[in-house]
Structures are given as structure tokens and as C-alpha cells.
Image: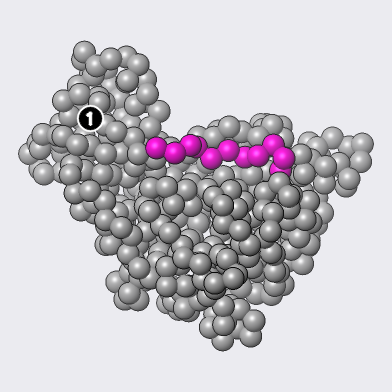
Amino acid sequence: MYNKPQYPQYLEAFWTQQAQDVLGPRSLTALREHVWALSTQFTAERPEHFSNYHRSAWTLLAYGLYFFPQSWVRLRYPLQELFEFRGWQPKLSGSAQGLKILDLGAGLGATGLSALAYLSGRGYAHVQLHAVDHSAQALEALEKLHRACYDTFWPGSQLKIYRESMLRVGPEHPRLGKESFDLIILGFSLNESHAQAEFDDKLFFLKHLTQLLSPSGILLILEPALKETSEALQRLSAELIQKSNLFSWGPYLHQGPCPLLSKGDVWTHEVRTWRIPQKLQQLGTPLFKVLHELKFSFSALGKRGAPALSEMGHTLRLVAPPYETKSVYLLKGVAQDGQIHSYELQRRDAPRARMAFLKHLERGDFVHIPVFKTLPGHEHFRLQAPEDIILLTP
Ligand SMILES: C[S@@+](CC[C@H](N)C(=O)[O-])C[C@H]1O[C@@H](n2cnc3c(N)ncnc32)[C@H](O)[C@@H]1O
């Protein structure tokens, strides 16, 4: 099991300083209305065309203090999962060049820089980050942050920025077309760049992008946890796996479609608790009820398959929070066979400390169930003891 990702204090300090430089003596809370406007745009409003919301300095700061930390930490969940649970080992794509990341719709750099910091922290030297966005203001802020934290987070790294539409990126792109990337990230940008696009257009775009992947590279797409965006992502991934010789590296262990797609009222997404950065709390408290949960959906695809996990017992990704009554504890997840399984444990006689621990399992965790009894229906199982639920991821 690995650690839950945290948002570094150093970055909070950077964005606080940027805000102070612009706001002067005014309180940070002056940014609240911009946080609200952006949040409405990302969720309820969902315009046909997203404007360059980084053009206004105040909106950019609202993003930096409120949305940037969330993207930074969200990206870490699937990235850590790939390295520390799925056994992903990106090979060096060019002997002397080190790893290469392409971040499309990079914005202020929350996803690309988070990946860069993680890889640098794992000992990869000379990592290159290629950041594409159509907002000049966003890329300028990204460059500033990369410079400011160079020694702390990504020593020896290189940043290349491209101010243009990400729709142009593919094998024919004059500068990026010849590159081979170990990690291509679409961090909450696909739903904006393709807000009105048909399924086939998105598929065509993603297929093209995968031609820029190195043989062991991964395309990592994060999207908002809304039903519409999460399901669209799972449908696209299923099609890419079926028709484009790509392999799924997440969110599931199997290669077929997400089984929740046929359920209608529930859909796959992660819900992660985190330590809320202080400034985010200050900005969000009167506006939003739930700040302690990070929600998102993701898909990770590669040209090669992931190493197989042990076939002993069941390993599953939780697709619902644990459900408890006075007498029963219930878990629901998608196992290696691609089916939704549920596991029931009688709480009677179970040690309290263990039950308290199990209560905090989260949607998106992987657990291993070594022994179980099959109940009628083949997708329903009974557990003998709470020790038969082994948490594998944070
Ligand atoms: C929600 S932000 C995400 C930024 C960053 N990846 C993150 O997670 O914080 C979406 C970004 O995509 C960019 N974007 C949207 N459509 C684009 C397009 N067609 N070409 C380039 N950038 C685009 C926006 O400017 C914005 O910076």
C-alpha cells in the first residue's frame, strides 16, 4: 500500500504570493466570485464553447488557489496507481533525453507539473514536459511556476510550451509529430476541447494521439466526475481497446467495457478524501458544502498490456463507498473478470478497530479478497472475517 497524495505547502505559498501581488491589500476572499463562476462553468453551465478563462488575472488566480490543488492531487492518484500498483515501467524514450510528458490543455500546469514532480521524485532525471494550451496567460503562469520551483520539485527538467489548439496535435504536427512520449495527459481538457464534438471525432482525435506514444507509453485522461463526462470517457476507452489495439491500465483490471455503463443510475468515478489546503478552504467554505472530497473519473491506456496480477482470490476496484447497517458491512467493486461483485460481512464479533478502518475505504480503492463463500447469483459473496479485506492502494 502506498501513501495518499498531498498538496505541497510550497505551491500554496506560490499561489498566495501571486494573489497578493495582484490583489494588494484586498482580502483573498475577493476571488470567491471567480471561484464560483468557474465552478458553475465546469459543472452546471457547461457552455458549448469554453472561453479563455485564464485571460482575467483574477480568474487565473482563482484557478491557481482553488482548482490547481485539486488537479495536482487528482492526477497523482492514477499516476501512483500505475507505478506503485500496476507495475508500469516507462522505458527511456530517447537514450540521453530521459522521460517525456505531453500535457494537452495544460492550463497553469497542475496536471503536467504534478506528473513532472512525481517522476523527478522517483529519481528520473532530465524529464521533459511539453505543455499545450490555447491560453497565453495560462502558459506564462506555468512557466513562472516551473522556474520558481525548479530546484525544489523538478531539478534538471525541461519545459517546452506550445500556445495553440490541442486539436492540432497528432502525427502531422510540425514540432510534436515526430516526438515519442512516455506519458500523454489530458487533464480535464477533453470535455472542453471537444465540448460539442461527436463521439467519432473524439475517437479519431484520441487514436491519432496514441500514435505519439512510445511503445511502453500511457495515455492518461482525467475528466470531471459528472455522469455525462465519466460515461463518455468510458465509452471512448472501450472503443479504443476493442478497435485500436490499446490496453486498459485503469480504472479496471479487465479489458472490456465498464460494467457500470449498463446500469444507468450509477457511473464510475473516484471519490477521494484529502487534506484541504488552507486557502482553498478559505475560498470555498461559504460556497460549497463538500470540500474534503476530490471527485473525478479517469482512463489509462497503453500500447502494451499491464503485468497480470495474481489470480488467487479476487482483486477489485471499489465502485461505491462501503455500506453499513447495524449487522452487515457491504462492499461493491469490479473484479478481474469485469463483473460487479458485492461482498457481505457480518459485523457481529468483528473487532471494532478493524471495522473503523474498513469504514474509511473509498470509491476507487483496490482491495484483495483472498477467501470468500459464493452465494446464489455468482456475483454475491460472503466473507468470514474483516481480515479478509486487504487494502492495496491508498
Ligand atoms: C479545466 S482546465 C485543466 C487545466 C489543467 N490540465 C488542470 O488540470 O488544472 C482545461 C484547460 O484546457 C484548455 N483548453 C481547452 N480547450 C482547448 C483547446 N482546444 N486547445 C488548447 N487548450 C484547450 C483550457 O485553456 C484550460 O487551460
Q: Judge whether residue 6 is colored magenta.
A: yes
Q: Which residues are magenta?
A: 1-11
Q: Judge whether residue 229 is colored magenta.
A: no
Figure quadrant of the N terminus: top left
Q: Residue at x 28, y 44 (%)?
A: 316
Q: Give the amino acid type for the residue marked by disc 1 in the picture.
A: Asp
Q: Quadrant of residue 381?
A: top left
What percent of the width, then of the height, locates residue 20? 86, 41
**In the image shown, does 331 or 290 lie closer to the viewer?**
331
Looking at this view, name the residue that lies furthest to the right: 25
Figure quadrant of the C terminus: top left
Within-10-Å neighbours for mark 1: few <14, some 14–19, many 20+? some
**In the image shown, does 297 or 226 lie closer to the viewer?**
297
Judged by its main secondary structure, the magenta piece is loop
Q: Residue at x 64, y 81 (%)?
A: 175
Residue 48 visible within the image? no
